[in-house]
Image (tube, rainbow, N blue to C red):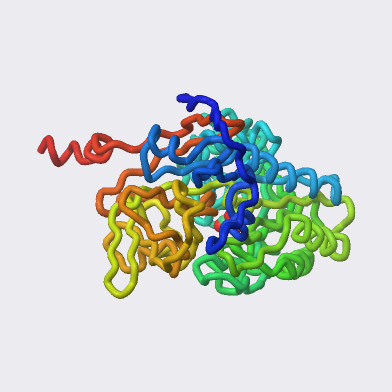
Amino acid sequence: MTAVPRVSTSTPVLSQPTPEGNRLGELWSILPEESAVDEAGVLHLGGVPVTELAEQYGTPLYVYDEAGLRRQIRRFIDGLNARWPESEVLFASKSFPAVGMYRVAAEEGLSVDIAGGGELRLALAAGVSPSKLHFHGNAKTDAELRMAIDAGVDTIIVDNTDELDRLERLLTKPQKLLLRVIPGVDAKTHASQATGGADSKFGLPMDQALAAIERMRAHPLLEFEGVHLHIGSQILDVEQFGEAVAKISTAGEFDVYDVGGGLGVKYTYDEVAPSVDAYLDTIVAAARAHLPSGARIMIEPGRAIVARAGVTLYRVTTVKRTGRTFVAVDGGLADQMDAALTGQRFEALLGNRALDPWTETSQLVGRQCESGDLLVDRAPLPEARVGDLAVVATTGAYGYTLANNYNGALKPAIVFVRDGAARLVARRETYEELLALHAPALEG
Ligand SMILES: Cc1ncc(COP(=O)(O)O)c(C=O)c1O
């Protein structure tokens, strides 16, 4: 792990500046909790100037505020525990599958939701106890199920009856299971993020679920414990979670109800997102109304744990004023795929010139060959210059997950910052690694 020296700013760090023309005042609620701007206009994250981070680790760079991240985890764990003591918070690790993050999750007492052999390997390598792992997926292979069983994962969330065939074949000892049920709730979110409607590819409809439960109960090694649902992601109306709990209660009385993840976060100036407390209040009120009082309740937040803690640093490579102003950076949808996949829009600032007058409206665009590679539509910014440091906020969830090699892009590095120090938790991919996959063709 590489460390950046502690920041020693001789000038006091401002925590809430709102100089004329800029929108920093509004950005505070979507930037990481440990953000500040010094008198030179440089953004500090976890006490480290972003200019130093970019210099030392290069760009694009995923940066996470570790203290804010840990605080947000505590809000979920303590908040649910205070309301419903027989409960468990799972981190939906697909939102940020990094060994450094699995380790933080384990240290803070989260259980972990994994959805594939790769996530299983990463979690185990990070030291997550198998007894904390819950294995999801609508198309688990024999090989993955074998890996999970051999590792001793706590629970497998069964999606379908083909998976039951596989488990019956593979299990040699009892295995705890939940069954994923389609609750029939159409989440108000992007179509690609809605997973609980009647035609979802995930889980079984109620009638088929009841038959699958009978089948599990009849088998000596299939330890059926309860049901699971997940209505989708980036859901901003908490009432939909309450509705899902009510729907799932009609499946019957069980020991466990896992009500999934999906709590949405505020990405843009205009968006309003519910608090963790409002979300937990709604779920627990619905549980009190509809579920057995002795049942164990699980939730699986991903995005709402990691999104705000993370930002992405980019170097401005081109500024074009062609009627509109295009500020192009050295990354894009290759490291922020949600921009194209779900049309997600972000907000940004110039991390090296935050206190300059914000006088221009710019299209903050990426470098991949797609017009949909738009990070911020009509971004209020200072007049950008080549070499500036664009900081895109609220990119802690699904950015690293979906990172790809479009146009030969390399997967960025990840740095955690805390108390004025930075530590590298994943290094940048290299061109050599990119080429290594093609060794067969090169040798041929
Ligand atoms: C089964 C399951 N649980 C939890 C999550 C996490 O969702 P989010 O990151 O929106 O909280 C997902 C995401 O798709 C999921 O598929």
Question: Which quadrant contains ligand 1?
Answer: bottom right
- Looking at the picture, tell me which residue is in the foreground, 214 or 387: 387
Residue 322's place in the image compared with 140, above or below, is below
Res. 149 in view? no
Q: Report which quarter residue 10 is drawn in.
A: top right
Q: Position of residue 67 (x, y in %)?
A: 64, 37
Q: Position of residue 29 (x, y in %)?
A: 64, 56
Q: Position of residue 144 (x, y in %)?
A: 48, 42
Q: Where is residue 22 in the image (x, y as percent from the top left)?
A: 53, 61
Q: Residue at x 13, y 38 (%)?
A: 442
Q: Residue at x 43, y 68 (%)?
A: 361
- Looking at the picture, tell me which residue is in the foreground, 441 or 381: 381
Q: Report which quarter residue 102 is drawn in.
A: top right
Q: Residue at x 28, y 56 (%)?
A: 318
- Looking at the picture, tell me which residue is in the foreground, 313 or 183: 313
- Looking at the picture, tell me which residue is in the foreground, 383 or 82: 383
- 312 displayed left or right of 407: right
- 376 displayed left or right of 165: left
In which quadrant of the rendered image does the C terminus lie?
A: top left
Q: Residue at x 87, y 57 (%)?
A: 292
- How many numbered marks are there? 0
Res. 133 in view? yes
- 328 displayed left or right of 97: left
